Amino acid sequence: MHVYNNEKEYKDIGGGVLRKVLAYSDNIMNVELLFEKGSGGAMHRHPHEQIGYVVEGSLIYKEEGREDTVLSAGDTYIVGPNVLHGIECITRVKLLDIFTPKREDFL
């Protein structure tokens, strides 16, 4: 299976954030996100394991029990299941997030 990015559409999820679900199976999902400068992902938790890759821009990554960290294009973060986390965008940001298992709430 393959997915053409240009055939998928972004969904406006509010607050200056757009989300595009790319490919997924029951066990894994990849999602592209665009964040306007100054927007972010509020602190939240979910039962999924997550790896995020900063495609472009800079953000502040926040995780419960850790110091805030500035990440820029090319940097990656890993979030364990049920760990409280969020981001604050310093610039316009494009992320590629990978979840396991898939995020039913995104479909």
Image (spheres, rainbow, N blue to C red):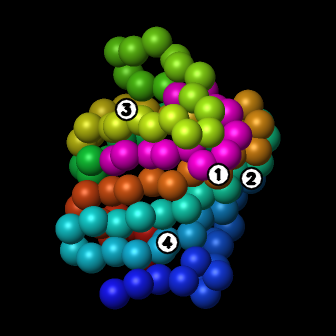
Viewer can see residue 42 = no
Is 49 on the left-hand or right-hand side of 3?
left
Quadrant of the drawing holding the N terminus: bottom left
Is 95 on the left-hand or right-hand side of 102?
right
In the rendered view, tell whether residue 66 sits above or below residue 57.
above
Q: Residues within 10 Å of mark 2 (few under 14, many from 20)?
A: some
Marks 4 and 1, Cα distance to the nearest angstrom? 13 Å
Which is nearer the N-term, disc 4 or disc 3? Answer: 4
- Name the disc covering residue 94, or none: 1
Marks 2 and 1, Cα distance to the nearest angstrom? 12 Å
- Residue at image position (26%, 38%) is 80
Viewer can see residue 62 = yes
Name the residue beneath numbered marker 3: 84
Q: Are marks 4 and 2 in contact (CB under 8 Å)?
A: no
- Residue 54 lies in the magenta stretch: yes
**Which mark is nearer the camera, 4 or 3?**
4
- Residue at image position (48%, 74%) is 22
In the rendered view, tell whether residue 90 sits above or below residue 93.
above
Question: Mark 1 belongs to which amino acid?
Answer: Lys
Q: Residues within 10 Å of mark 1 (few under 14, many from 20)?
A: many
The location of residue 95, given as percent across then percent down, is: 57, 51
Mark 1 secondary-structure assignment: strand
Marks 4 and 2, Cα distance to the nearest angstrom? 17 Å
